[in-house]
Image (cartoon, coloured by chain):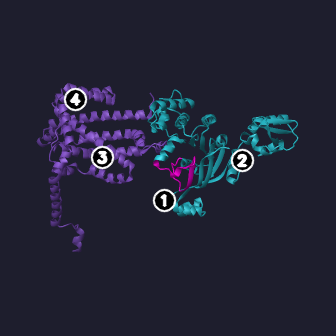
Chain colours: A purple, B cyan
Amino acid sequence: MEKLFLSEFPELSRETLRFIKKGFDTSYRAFSREYGDTIEAVFDPVLYFLVWFEKLLQNSPWPLVLICFLAVIYFGSRKISVTIGSLFAFLLIGIFGMWEDTMSTVSIIGVCTLLSIGIGIPVGVLMAKSERAQRICTPILDVMQTMPSFVYLIPVVMLLGIGKIPGLLAVVIYAIPPIIRLTNLGIREVDSEVLEAADAFGANPRQKLFQIQLPLALPTIFAGINQTIMMALAMVVIASMIGVKGLGQPVLKAITNQYFAMGLFNGLAIVALAIIFDRVSQSFGHRIQQHRSGARE
Amino acid sequence: MSEIKIQIKNLYKIFGKNPKSALEQVKDGVNKDELLEKYNHVLGLKDINLDIKEKSIQVVMGLSGSGKSTLIRHINRLIEPTDGSVVVDDEDVLKMNDENLRNFRRTKTAMVFQRFALLPHKTVLENTMFGLNIQNIDEKEANTKARRWIDRVGLSGYEEKYPQHLSGGMQQRVGLARALTNDGEILLMDEAFSALDPLIRKDMQDILLELQDELHKTVVFITHDLDEALKIGDRIAILKDGIMDQEGIPADILLSPKTQYVKDFVEDVNRARVIKAKHIMSTINGQDISNAMVVNQDDFIDRFIDKVISEKPNCIIVKDKQDKNVGYLSSTRLAEILKR
């Protein structure tokens, strides 16, 4: 008996385990039946916006969309090389028949990034201001970043079904931690002497936040935004498993049917998007930093 | 003579987990080392009493760790004291609520920091306007004021530069302009010139004295440099280990140091440059004043010492600004003062 106890871990009986799991699942199912519609309704505005944005990108004449993209890229990066590189990348994407899927992906990445910024920066600020918020948020962020994404896809799909919104949620959950963490870090790194000076001149907490902490944290926050975009792009394939349209779906199809070329083309399109997003957001972030450090002209 | 602007009374500051209980120990006579060793609290300030006169420059001097920076931060309550009171213009700073304290800091005080503490993302002009922006003062008015002070500290033409473009001395001019633009009656300077090169430091001291002649602010000036203290201060307070050793006019501190610490401090000072005729004169009562040399009461000794040596007068008569004889100075007395 003693030997058996040591060699085998004393686990719960099969019965008990099944009971626990089943209880958990049924109660969650009951919850999602009860509140699923309400929660879905909450996300309706986001869904409308997402659909509108996607349609806008897909239905506008492609040269117009391309010109708009290039304008944004140029004003973001202020680099001719990046702009021309992007032009070729988009032309190739179009020629290889991936324009429409790319527009879907751009729209969902765009909306996810906006949502992440909109939620992430305030949460990061809160974490920087309160030790308790930091203690609560840090483990949650750890879970969000390490939990395999398929695991949290299950409850999301159970709750909201298959479609754009669950995909969007999955992407945001995966992509939001860096911007929260880096906003927190950026604000905490602001020189305490500068803050003391602000106090000495009678700045209130709001003025300190908007005139000193956020502007000085901006380069760090931008590094977070860059990370967030990259992680959102990395999620497009997984998100396509629950019905998000875009470049992820052909990749998924290629995996299941062993279409190597198709997977490669779409994969490369994702890579191209990633590089463009990265270069633009990085050089934009860099420009703010130069401004901050007052680089000699 | 002049009114008391800032009154610091029985001020204690103890750093640690439970300062209130440590305060009892300190009041019972536990000293700094014992407090740290036995009770694990750091004594910042102990029973500081200081009256700072309006429109004068009060220097607080001490070595690092003496509590001087802690003391100046109590005046605008960047640090909360453990016990005691700080009264500015009959109002207890420590009893103000957040809103009143902010207003007090905005309108009454301005501070200059040792390491400048400029806002790196704002230009010189924006930095200078910072205090006024905080008060939501009209942009145009703030701009005009800021430009005037930038000009006064000699930084015209640098308005659009960022602090990183500037040398340390120039950055501290921005710090000074920022404080002056705020136009508070009290100017708190925390080792404002300590980080600067000697020559630039001298420049800045001269700028400060020149401005003070015209602005008559109440200045609290922290320094660890005795020469600076003697040059700038109307009065000097000497801090050691959180305790105030001596407070008085520079000449008193030089001529009659109260503790060994102060004595060691003032030992190597060139007295001729610091002591004025009025500090060492005695009253006239019937001395022989024939063949006397006349000096002004505000002259430093080194202004007339050469003349004394070459002319060898019997005695020296000290006159005030109205040309009235106010005192008398014998050569023996003069020699005695300068001997050490």
Tell which residue pokes out farthest to the front in this image: B90
Q: CA distance from mark 4 to mark 1?
A: 62 Å
Label 1, secondary structure: give it: loop
Circle 3 sits on which residue?
A177
Q: CA distance from mark 2 to mark 3?
A: 64 Å
Amino acid type, mark 2? Asp
Mark 1 Cα shell of 10 Å, populated few (<14), some (14-19), many (≥20): few
Asked if marks 4 and 1 touch (Cβ < 8 Å), the reply is no
Q: Are marks 2 and 3 on the same chain?
A: no
Please name whichever residue, A109 or A195, is drawn nearer the observer in this view of the structure.
A195
Residue B252: which numbered mark, if any? 2
Whether residue A266 sits left or right of residue B123 in the image: it is: left
**Residue A200 appears in the rendering:** no
Q: Are marks 4 and 3 on the same chain?
A: yes
Amino acid type, mark 4? Phe
Circle 4 sits on which residue?
A90
Residue B333 location (% of width, % of height) = 81, 44
Residue B17: which numbered mark, if any? 1
Q: Which residues are magenta?
A: B76-98
Query: Mark 2 or mark 3, which is nearer to you?
Result: 2
Residue A241 location (% of width, % of height) = 16, 44
Q: Going 36% across and 35% down the picture, which residue do you hit? A: A285
Whether B103 is drawn above or below B323: the answer is below
Please name whichever residue, B308 or A45, is drawn nearer the observer in this view of the structure.
A45
Of the numbered discs 4 and 3, the one sitting upstream in the chain is 4
Residue B34, quarter of picture: bottom right
